[in-house]
Image (cartoon, grey):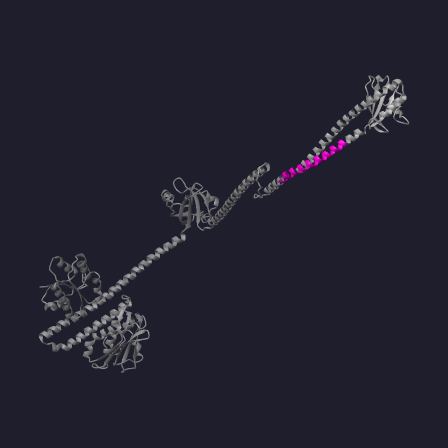
Amino acid sequence: MSLRARLIGGTLFLIVVLSVGVITLLRSTLAGRLESELQRRGVAIAKYIAADCAGPLISDDLVALQLVVNAGVHVEDDIAYVFVQDPAGAVMAHSFGASFPVALREANRGGADGVPRVRRLATGLGEIHDVALPLVHGELGTVRVGLRGESIRASVSRVLKVGAAITIACLAVFGAFVLAVDIGITNNLSRLNEATRALGLGDLEHRLPDQGRGEFADLARAFNAMADNLQRSEDKLVDLNTLLLREVRDRTRAEEELRRSLQRYSVLFSGVSDGVYVSAVGAEGPDGRIVEVNDAGCRRLGYTREEVLGMTMADLEAPGGVAAGGAAALERMNAGETVVFERVHRTREGRRVPVEISARLFDLEGRHLVMAICRDVTERKLAEAELRLASAELARQNEELKKLDRLRDGFIRDVSHELKTPVAKHAMQLEILRSIAAREGFADRIDGVLAVMASSVSRQQKVIKNLLGLARLESGVRSYRRERVRLDELLRGVIADYEPELRAREIAVASALDPLAVTSDGEMLWHVFSNLVNNAIKFQQSPQGGGIEVRLAQEGGAAVVRVRDEGIGLEPGEREKVFEKFYQATASAEGSGVGLTICRMIVEGVGGSIWFESAGRGTGATAVVSLPLETPGETA
Amino acid sequence: MKTLLIVEDDTDIQDYYQILLAELGVKTIRCYNGREGLAVIDAGTPVDLVLLDIVLPEMGGEEFFRELRVKRGSPLPVIVCSVDEKLVEPLRGIGPVQGTFLKGDPGSALLGLIRQQLATQDGR
């Protein structure tokens, strides 16, 4: 039941109960008092009447008695009757008028000791308080007075009414008061209740207004403080929770990664095609028991996993192997190195397998372990052996080639020297002879002979030079240089070189040389143009006279040199043949016949081209050399 | 009088040099290989110029030249005489060569070189 109901109900109930109690008490007390009051009055009246009756009684005057009785009835309003009884109880006078209710006579009687007695009677006249007053101890008779009880009742009911009214008023007042108080309380309580419920449902923002003083304000403040605390705690919890969640997530992720990497590792480990053995570190060295091995490690030697796990690394080796310094190896492994060494393992069937082992130390859960990766190097060993053989063979061949090279170089050098020396000596001797002849005066006699000899020597020299030059070029002894060569200056130089001969043979020389430069081998080009000019001189139609024309001009992206002679010319078929080795246009021509071959080799070697133009025999010929210009229009 | 050291194994060529040098009025010492040449120099004989052949028995011109220039640090003028230009090149890498004469070329060329060298010496 709610507080309100209880309070109000209780209050009202209390009030009602109290009222009823009070009223009842009042009623009875009042009634009693009133009754006794009435009775006293009744007695008093009876006595009064009795006093008047005494005389008549004594004188037995019934009429006077009746008068007294009649007078007596009207003394008070509420006297219902008055009558007098003789000592025998017979009614001597009464106020009833017509008939006297007989029953009344014995209804009451006075006390034996003369004390009046009052008795309540229920008669046809209503409630009567009958007073019996004995006169002279009853000897004279008894005066009987009947008082109506209504007045009592009326008073009582009046009091009751007042009481009820008061009760009701109290009820109202107190009820209102209680209601007011209750409302105050209940409102606060319900607010508190609401707040608490809200708090209970999780709304930590809820606060109560906490102004003022009094229990509810204190309660409100306490509530607010509690809510604050709760909220702080909740916030802290939320933070902690977030942290926790994050940690859990991180841990889950780490676990996941670990799982994945473990998986990867196990895949790798089992999938590696080399044998991987993990062994404990033994007392003297890394030859402890094998504690883990991958598939390849078992398969390659034909053992089962169980078999391998019961062996040490040494057990895998074939007998007769080299027991290399295990202690030294362990030391290096302790330093963190990966030690690589070779061994020979033995398969289950006894086949020998050369292996290369790379081993390193690592710690796992406090244990020192050695991980050894064993790679079958049979193939490699074979390949190495073959390689060594091939290498040796190659070296031998290289030596042979070098020897040949040296021989050839030496040959060329020797030939060069051996050919040139006698020729040089000829020249020297001729010089001496000439000077002696001049001194002794027979120079003119031997002049012709000397001239022939000189020319012969000269030819020899040229031939040797050409041959050797060709040999050198062919053997690659000399590579073409790359330098800036002013072709116009080079050609001028070549022409100047031949000037004595040209003058001697009265050959007219014309030149039109544009200033052009190329990046090429100057020395070799000199040989080429010198050769061409020499040929131009050589193939003149007559020993005297004739002409040579040298032109140099840019044509397109090339520098083109044209050496034109008025010589014997070339047939169409000969124009290419002249470049062949040892080709002679005419039998009597001087020269070794290798000049043009060398010229072509050089010209083409520096990236140009050389050819002859001729209209035919007897019309002269033009030697044309085309050399690429680096940048078009490269001028001096 | 200037002294020329001729290092040449061919006696005919030695003779040629001799005849050629006659008009210069110089003294000549003839050696047949590099070792003999070094012996002459080491003996303290005053030499003003060397005519050096390359292809020699026992000790060739290149080795002689190396001994001279590198080992002894001698600035003694050397004119290299050879039939082949190619053979002279290595010497240029070892030290300064004061002249080159190709055997078979006119003797006047050699004379010119020698005169030039001796004149330079006198001028100093």
Q: Is residue A327 above or below residue A105?
A: below
Give the x, y percent position of residue B54: 19, 63
Residue A116 counted in the magenta span: no
How many numbered discs? 0
Q: Is residue A299 above or below residue A598?
A: above
Location of the C terminus of chain A by quadrant is bottom left
Tell me the residue at 12%/66% (across/down): B119
Q: Is residue A48 above or below residue A541?
A: above
Tell me the residue at 72%/35% (across/down): A168
- Where is residue B26, by image quadrant? bottom left
Q: Is residue A457 above or below residue A131?
A: below
Give the x, y percent position of residue A515: 27, 74
- Where is residue A325, by image quadrant? top left
* Drawn side of residue B51 relative to residue A167, left or right: left
* Drawn side of residue A570 relative to residue A119, left or right: left
Give the x, y percent position of residue A146: 84, 25
Q: Nearer the viewer, residue A388 or A612?
A: A612
Q: Nearer the viewer, residue A473 or A362?
A: A362
Q: Is residue A381 visible?
A: yes
Q: Is residue A594 visible?
A: no
Location of the N terminus of chain A by quadrant is top right
The residue lying furthest to the bottom in this view is: A618
Q: Nearer the viewer, residue A84 or A384?
A: A84
The residue lying furthest to the right in this view is: A98
* Drawn side of residue A568 relative to residue A101, left or right: left
* Drawn side of residue A25 relative to residue A181, left or right: right
Question: For the magenta stretch, what is the residue range?
Answer: A158-187
Q: Nearer the viewer, residue A632 or B77?
A: A632
Give the x, y percent position of residue B118: 12, 65
Magenta residues, dominant SS class = helix
